[in-house]
Image (tube, helix red, strand yellow):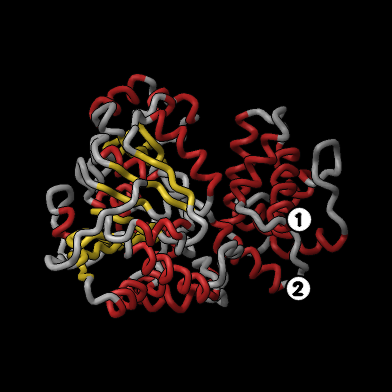
Amino acid sequence: MNPSARIQGTLELLTEIAAAPRPADSITSAYFRNRRYIGSKDRAEISTRLYAVLRHHARVGWWLQKFHVAEAPRARMLVYLTLVEGIPEETVKELFSGGKFAPEELDENERKFLHKLSTRTLEHPNMPEEVRGECPDWAATSLKARFGINFMHEMEALLAPAPLDLRVNSLKATRDEILVALKKIGCKAVAGKLSPYSIRIADRPSLSALPMLKNGEVEIQDEGSQLVALMVDAQPGQRVVDFCAGAGGKTLAIAAAMKNKGRIIACDVLTNRLKRSTERFRRAGLHNIEVKPLTSESDPWVKRHKASFDRVLVDAPCSGTGTWRRNPDSRWNMLAPNLENLTGLQGKILASAARLVKPGGRLIYATCSLLPEENEEQVEKFLAAHPDFTVLPFETVVADKLPSTHAQYLALTPARHRTDGFFAAVMERKAAPNQDKIVPDAI
């Protein structure tokens, strides 16, 4: 593909993303799946430019408003090519040639707009802080309150592309063994700094070129997500529930920590995602996992198995603000319920899942959010309503696994920890020696 054709491909994707209420990554995957004639190099260039445009959404939009230009993928592309990539005016005109596989030729209004842009730079003194930081209005107040003077530092970190992290499956290999294997195939990799099982890939290899991924020796998992799984502190022989298991990433890590001994139940209302996770479990050599679809957070199964489990992880559905590096479109296209509805749902899920925790057991609440409303405030509301639970400080849970810290909760951010943004709290149910012994139904 020539440069014009690659720009046309990016424009087609931008048009689909603007029109469809679906995540950009799923739209992009479907686009390339239906166009297998596009080579790997062209796919990479189109994807890179697409996500760069999405990461400049607010700043590009500010220039459209400044010059009273209607919102459209072509207009956005003109701003991006000129102010971000720095392509000269005449070259942009040549790229929009109207030739075969190229974008249509610029009309008179587009030419005038392009000429005005040619003397500008991306950032302008009148740009609000939220625009420069690509922070949507619905999240700005909370994030500014949390980060204070570090707000822009954190927002800038969220604009950088996320790295590729692997988690070593300790049942099949050690981290040192995988690092040696990666080096042999020419892949630049280093040991993670936070998780004892993490490896960070320095370049962007084709995943099909990683044999250790195919045979289950490693899984793709952000280092922050690995720490959440470590906070579950599941022991061999215990009974564990991953209440919102999704595709099973944390379930895999927890099951490996249990050394295939005991039982872990992977629950979710998204049945299809659970079904797809079973192949990952098999590839990893794990046989202590059972999949359990739920109809809702208050499924009768929960009541039948109350007070039955040593550990219950609630990786709650959330705004995903901590994953903006990976999903830049989600800032502007919240596919989940609005924040008020979302926090209400989180509270219901947490309260229902808590019923599964036996006396002396632990409830772990986690999100990939940076917002206090979904994190600390959610935990505080739960504790106020459930006096039989108390918080276990972060350090007491992972003292033998991670460097010393005096934090009460796990609270990771891209700027400070170079991971996705994650929050996790561990709460222990007080022992009740006089409570009648509960014998759960068969799972």
Residue shown at 60% from the left, 66% from the top: 58
Q: Percent x, y for residue 191?
A: 26, 37
Q: Nearer the viewer, residue 171 or 55?
A: 171
Residue 122 in sight in this render: no
Horizontal side of residue 432 vs 4, given as left or right: left
Mark 1 element type: helix
Q: Percent x, y for residue 244?
A: 42, 54
Q: Percent x, y for residue 161?
A: 47, 49
Q: Nearer the viewer, residue 246 or 292?
A: 292
Horizontal side of residue 185 vs 390, given as left or right: right
Q: Percent x, y for residue 176?
A: 23, 29
Q: Quadrant of residue 313?
A: bottom left
Q: Which amino acid, by three-letter code, is at mark 1?
A: Arg
Mark 2 element type: loop
Q: Which amino acid, by three-letter code, is at mark 2?
A: His
Residue shown at 47% from the left, 45% from the top: 247
Mark 1 → mark 2, Cα distance in angstroms: 15 Å
211 to 51, vertically: above or below: above
Mark 1 or mark 2: name the one nearer the start of the chain.
Answer: 2
273 to 137, vertically: above or below: above
- For label 1, the residue is 74
Residue 398 in sight in this render: yes
Q: Nearer the viewer, residue 434 or 99?
A: 434
Q: Which mark is residue 68?
A: 2
